[in-house]
Image (tube, rainbow, N blue to C red):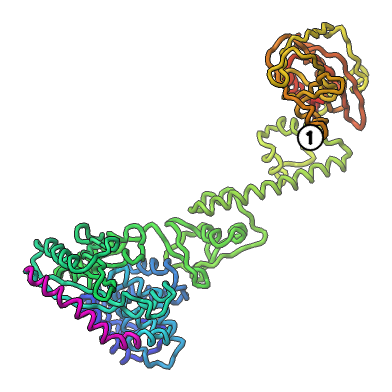
Amino acid sequence: MASQFAFNYAKKKEMASQTATILTDEIGLKGDAVQAVMLGPDLDDGRITLEEIRNQYGESVARILEGLDRIQQLYKKNPVVESENFRNLLLSFAEDMRVVLIMIADRLNLMRQIRDTDNEEARQEVSQEAAYLYAPLAHKLGLYQLKSELEDLSLKYMEHDAYYMIREKLNQTKASRDAYIDAFIRPVEEKVKAAGINCHIKGRTKSIHSIWEKMKKQKCGFEGIYDLFAIRIIIDCPEEKEKMQCWQAYSIVTDMYQPNPKRLRDWLSVPKSNGYESLHITVLGPQQKWVEVQIRTERMDEIAEKGVAAHWRYKGVKGEAGLDDWLSGIRSMLEHADGLEAMDQFKMDLYEDEVFVFTPRGDLFKFPVGATVLDFAYHIHSKLGNQCTGGRINGRVVSIRQLLKSGDQVEILTSSNQKPHQEWLSIVKTSRAKSKIRLALKETQVKDGLFAKEMLERKFKNRKIEHDESLMMHTIKKMGFKEVSDFYKQIADGLLDVNAVIDKYIEVREAEKTITGDNVARSASEFELDNSKFSTLNSQISDDVLVIDRNLKGLDYQLARCCSPIYGDSIFGFVTISGGIKIHRVDCPNAPELRRRYGYRVVKARWSGKGSSQYSITLRVIGNDDIGIVNNLTSIISKDERLILRSINIDSHDGLFSGNLTVMLEDTSRLEGLLKKLRTVKGVKQVDRI
């Protein structure tokens, strides 16, 4: 199985026999699984074909050997075996669960055989795989004894000094440890048996690997580890009396020794999902030492010791969704002798919704079923995804749409000229890839829009035509575009001719001009205000209520000319030298200086009641130099009976006009309505209150 070592045929047969013994004696597996192991060397050496095996030994044996071959093919991809994904891939690849059990048995056998090898590099590699891959797999399957031995052997080869230091310390303390265990067990055994409970009690020293892990975790020496062993009380009784006698033994132990209630683990009342049953309690034994005591029956102990009970969840090796059911199925098949033959039909569908894929370097990633080469590219890096033109799967060139399958080794092909397309969103499966594509499309659209806009403006300049943004927006709408971005995208993609756009722009501009009798557009500066169109009523009744400072009403005040506040503005009062009060807007340009230098003269003020007062405000207007635009502005004001235009000053320069309009109105809500109307006039670029 291990490609790190080259064995001849005779050695392979010898090791196959040893692996078969482990399967039979230590796992409880026989039949087709053992037959497949024994035939493996003959298949590898070409002495028999898979078809001949199928004909002579049956489909089940052939299927197991096919599964083992698939695993070997995975190893050729140089996987990173430390990855949890690789463990899951192995489980998903081995349809027949016996393949995984054979792999574990084979690796344990190899670890037992390589003690004297001269190939140190290969021994290290095999040991690392045992620690990172096979021991956790054995843990998941609950093969506790095999898991512990794999861990101890890997520690022996990888951390030689630590292993032998702990082993030596255990040997040195064995006599005192055995004496302590005997002193603890004897009185307990006497009392338990006196109560009519048939049992035997034994002490179990923890594995060297688990002690080393505790030393590293607790950052202490060997002497700092106190729970080097556990006491196990194993009761022999009928199944219907199991719970009663286990709790009876528990009562006897806790009467004799002080228990730690926080360390009680009751898997008797509610067994673990994988079938593990036992009572665990930690008590304060002789010499004030904490001792872990496990209470179980012969039946429970047999299941636990053979690993079918699976400590994997309790110890923290958490599985994927569905693993509980899978392990439960394995447990029931291995637990009953008559169920072993049912293994022939056992299939694994645990990871049917996931695929596991390799990079060329051996890194392993998990994807949902239906994921494509493009998903893989975006998972690695956004730039790789954006420039992806296809891939190479197991050496074969494929498109970006190619679906991924478990075990595929994927290499991404790119081009600097490639860029994301809208249809890519329907190719990818993962949300990660979709979000990256959307982001890339948005960035591309912005870049293309800027490029198209610059190209259009350059063409305007070459044809010596003034480019007006508001008129351009009007032209875009006239051409049937709802989104400006779509307009510029068509220019960038070459679907829209720039010259045709400019021709349309000129057509729209000419249609909107105010034409005089001599066919010449008049400048806005020629505008003269016809006062007869406007009401000259100047309602200056100051009946709006203004509250100053602390609810003071009726005080004389003046509205500051620097900011011309009106009803509804946020305001404050400023006490002048003469004692009068001037009212300023909070956003008055002079407000910061007044507060900084004369803060003690600033008083609160607010509008409190609405009367019929009107206020003078000045608006700054900028637009295209066209008298028709100014006519439209004044027309809007004249149509509102509650607005009074007091004055208008217009100046023209470089194709634009700017002007100040002084208007009488009632409050800020009326002002906001007016600003909104004026800003909708075509050709107007800016309207602001001064």
Residue 584, compared with residue 637, is above or below; it is below
Q: Residue shown at 28%/86% (left/top)? A: 174
Closest to the observer, 13 or 502: 13
Q: Please state, as top left, top right, bottom left or bottom right, where the N terminus lies in the image.
A: bottom left
Say whether residue 156 is magenta: no
Closest to the observer, 118 or 210: 210
Q: Percent position (x, y) of residue 180?
A: 23, 80
Q: Residue shown at 89%/30% (left/top)? A: 655
Is residue 195 found left or right of 185 in the rendered image?
A: left
Residue 459, compared with residue 382, is above or below; it is above
Q: Residues within 10 Å of mark 1 (few under 14, many from 20)?
A: few
Instruction: Write down the residue under mark 1.
Output: 469
The magenta stretch is: 167-195
Closest to the observer, 375 or 494: 375
Q: What residue type is labelled 1?
A: Glu
Say whether residue 173 is magenta: yes
Residue 449, compared with residue 637, is above or below; it is below
Closest to the observer, 454 or 174: 174
Q: Percent position (x, y) of residue 663?
A: 81, 16
| Label 1 element class | helix
Q: In which quarter of the image is residue 184?
A: bottom left
Q: Residue shown at 20%/66% (left/top)? A: 333
Is residue 206 found left or right of 590 in the rendered image?
A: left
